[in-house]
Image (cartoon, rainbow, N blue to C red):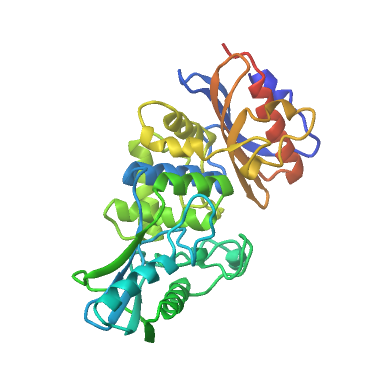
């Protein structure tokens, strides 16, 4: 295996990397290069965040957005941290909970009580601390929203991952809810931020898709916003405040209990946007082995959410040259991309039937395109090996 990987030469690749290849069933190490040294993982960090959240909360867990009424005529929209709460249904899979659906159910209940005019409050207090990670540069504002337990369409003003973002996603969600109530014949007289009393009766509630569906989707499309939400949800699920600091501690603790944590690791966020986050390839491979095995079925969405080479997700347009074409349809992985960072972690079924977990984290390549090509060719070489 070592000779096979070293034989892959791509002009301009010249860089340092952490790499590991391990047989899933036996744990036999087939290749290791700087495998325990922490490198910037970029979006492959989402695999570890997802693993911790699934382990703490369980794959069937859902997040609820509620409309409560402390007193007649007073309505409060309470965010439960649904990363995919949408303004309205669009027919896409997986199906998302919608603010319009919540408004219809709320209006129906209000009309039963003969209430047609309300004041509206909104409560996003489930998450605490800074909404914007101080480790992120300001220009990331076009790639990720200020993390909130209450938002619609991930706090995005337009469509796509690079569209502008609202500075106050919770306020915008409340505005969308007020508009939807108006369409149902309910007049909203005022809107303000508030805290909902825990004893306030629930008038209506919508539930998110299950956490396993959330994880599959966020990994497939490499969703920074959703990753940051479930990062904080891991802390909440562990009984801690939903802040960046607490999420970092909880994820570290959970990964330690699972046997994944490595001394070379440092966690600063859930999405991998922070360059201070460091992960060795060894830890990535341990995580993939665990999720692919039989002892932790609750982690299976980490595996099913991986993109298939040349077919879907972030690997759809990869593996296109003669040296990597053989891996199309065989390699499944999660990519990571930042300036001067290229990474890929996943698994592959080789030609002799071996199931191998791999991770390669490249930092500071001379040419980033060359680094991507090297990753494709190396994993293609792994897929064609006889490892038994």
Q: Residue 284: percent from the left, percent from the top? A: 50, 36
* Quadrant housing the N terminus: top right
Identify the residue at the far top of this view: 388
- In-front residue for pair 46/278: 46
Residue beneath the point at 61% across and 70% down: 164
User: Does residue 299 appear anywhere in the picture?
Assistant: yes
Q: Residue 306: percent from the left, percent from the top? A: 55, 38
Residue beneath the point at 73% across and 45% down: 368
Snapshot quadrant of residue 141: bottom right
Q: Residue 192: percent from the left, percent from the top? A: 37, 83
As drawn, 355 above or below 336: above
Residue beneath the point at 38% across and 70% down: 104
Is 91 on the left or on the right of 366, as rendered? left
Residue beneath the point at 69% across and 23% down: 381
* Quadrant housing the C terminus: top right
Snapshot quadrant of residue 206: bottom left
User: Does residue 14 appear anywhere in the picture?
Assistant: no
Q: Residue 311: percent from the left, percent from the top? A: 66, 37
- In-front residue for pair 174/107: 107
- In-front residue for pair 264/180: 180
């Amino acid at each position: 295996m070592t000779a096979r990987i070293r034989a892959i030469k791509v002009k301009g690749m010249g860089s340092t990397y952490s790499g590991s290849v391990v047989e899933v069933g036996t744990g036999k190490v087939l290749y290791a290069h700087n495998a325990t040294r922490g490198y910037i993982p970029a979006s492959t960090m989402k695999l570890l965040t997802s693993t911790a959240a699934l382990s703490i909360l369980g794959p069937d867990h859902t997040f609820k957005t509620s409309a409560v009424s402390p007193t007649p005529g007073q309505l409060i929209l309470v965010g439960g941290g649904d990363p995919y709460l949408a303004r309205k249904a669009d027919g896409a899979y997986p199906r998302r909970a919608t603010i319009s659906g919540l408004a219809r159910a709320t209006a129906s209940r209000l009309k039963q009580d003969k209430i047609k005019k309300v004041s509206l409050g909104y409560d996003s207090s489930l998450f605490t601390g800074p909404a914007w990670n101080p480790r992120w540069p300001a220009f990331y504002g076009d790639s990720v929203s200020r993390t909130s337990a209450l938002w619609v369409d991930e706090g995005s003003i337009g469509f796509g991952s690079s569209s502008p973002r609202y500075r106050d996603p919770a306020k915008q969600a409340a505005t969308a809810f007020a508009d939807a109530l108006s369409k149902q014949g309910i007049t909203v007289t005022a809107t303000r931020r508030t805290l909902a009393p825990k004893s306030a009766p629930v008038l209506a509630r919508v539930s998110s898709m299950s956490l396993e569906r959330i994880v599959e989707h966020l990994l497939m499309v490499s969703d920074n916003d959703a990753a940051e939400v479930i990062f904080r949800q891991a802390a909440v699920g562990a009984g801690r405040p939903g802040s960046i600091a607490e999420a970092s501690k909880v994820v570290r603790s959970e990964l330690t209990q699972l046997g994944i944590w490595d001394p070379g690791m440092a966690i600063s966020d859930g999405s991998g946007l922070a360059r201070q986050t460091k992960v060795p390839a060894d830890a990535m491979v341990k995580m993939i082995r665990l999720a692919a095995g039989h002892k932790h079925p609750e982690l299976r969405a980490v595996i099913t959410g991986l993109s298939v080479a040349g077919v879907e997700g972030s690997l759809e347009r990869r593996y296109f040259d003669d040296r990597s074409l053989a891996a199309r349809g065989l390699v499944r992985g999660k990519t990571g991309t930042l300036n001067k960072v290229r990474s890929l972690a996943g698994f592959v079924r080789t030609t002799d039937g071996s199931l191998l977990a791999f991770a390669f984290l490249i930092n500071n390549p001379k040419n980033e395109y060359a680094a991507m090509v090297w990753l494709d060719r190396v994993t293609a070489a792994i897929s064609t090996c006889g490892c038994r």
